[in-house]
Amino acid sequence: MSGVIKENIKSIFFITAGIFSASFGLEGFLLPSHFIDGGVTGISLLVALTTKISLSVLILIINIPFIILAFSQISRVFAIKTFVAIAGMSIVLALVDFPVITHDKLLIAIFGGLFLGAGVGLSVRGGSVLDGTEILALYVTRRVEASIGDMLMVFNVIIFCCAAFILGIESALYSILTYLAAGKIIDYIVEGVEEYTGVTIISEKSAKVKRVLMTKLGRGITIYKGKRSIIGKHADLEGVSDMEIIFTIVTKLEIGKVKRLVNEVDEHAFIYYFPISSAKGGVLKRRPLHE
């Protein structure tokens, strides 16, 4: 089986799973309790709760302008996948009758956001989105000095203010909780344990550490030139020596292995690490299931 076919099968699987997860979150939790989410989904829910228009119809219609924008400004493949994902969710919402799971408002807000966020995250791994707001945010950020997160926050603040006016303060507050829960789940599914992590290592045995990282971990490394200073008891500078600072990028799953390999060479080595939102090129482990 060729790589292209495998990628297409993965894409179909994740988009399908995302459709059903998001649909379950909407009909099984949010819609019966008059809770909404952010973005186009939130707008659709708000309109559906205040009119007699079907949610499945609204989600498709309101997203169409954003799909057209994606087609002209991002890529045709992405736009087509997004259209298929959104149309698929509309069909599932129209044809599948999901049971109402609970009437507890806190559980609805948390688990509704969980399933909705999981659906969006899975669709992203499949190469699409289930909400056109992200497309609009990406388009706007190319023309103004703002991040995608900033633009999404502005859109959603407006949506939740409208929800507070139409549905009431309590429903709006629970809806914000839903939005936050969904956002956390999206981040975890899209990045998850395979999130890129920058690792900095300071060791007196840097030559051996470099060798073990390249041979046993198979990672490229970057060397910074630094100086080590030692302070005496009376705050007198006792000495300054040149040293090498090792930097490499791994995934969260590999952090334990890096620490173990370095510890075998130098148990007194100083190691610190931090998440990296994106990385490209070099000798990087390709994160599975997305990119």
Image: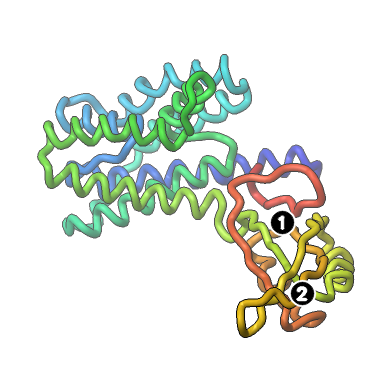
Determine if residue 127 is in view: yes
Picture quadrant where residue 242 is located: bottom right
Amino acid bearing label 1:
Ile
Work out which quarter of the rendered image holds the C terminus and state it.
top right
Please state which of residues 234 and 225 is positioned toward the viewer in this rendering. Answer: 234
Please state which of residues 158 and 221 is positioned toward the viewer in this rendering. Answer: 221
Q: Residues within 10 Å of mark 1 (few under 14, many from 20)?
A: many
Residue 289 placement, left or right of 227: left
Q: Residues within 10 Å of mark 2 (few under 14, many from 20)?
A: few
The residue at the point 45 percent across, 21 percent down is: 66
Residue assigned mark 1? 249
Q: CA distance from mark 2 to mark 1?
A: 31 Å
Task: Label 2, secondary structure: give it.
Answer: strand
Rendered view: 168 above or below 190: above
Determine if residue 94 is in view: no
Q: Position of residue 2 (x, y in %)?
A: 81, 42
The residue at the point 36 percent across, 20 percent down is: 61
Work out which quarter of the rendered image holds the N terminus and state it.
top right
Task: Label 1, secondary structure: give it.
Answer: strand
Depth-wise, is mark 2 or mark 1 nearer the camera? 2
Please state which of residues 149 and 132 is positioned toward the viewer in this rendering. Answer: 149
Q: Earlier in the sequence, mark 2 or mark 1?
A: 2
The residue at the point 25 percent across, 28 percent down is: 54
Q: Which mark is residue 110?
A: none
Q: Which mark is residue 239?
A: 2
Q: Position of residue 178 (x, y in %)?
A: 29, 49
Rendered view: 235 above or below 163: below
Amino acid bearing label 2:
Gly
Q: Position of residue 107 (x, y in %)?
A: 24, 59
The residue at the point 63 percent across, 25 percent down is: 77
Q: Position of residue 195 (x, y in %)?
A: 60, 55
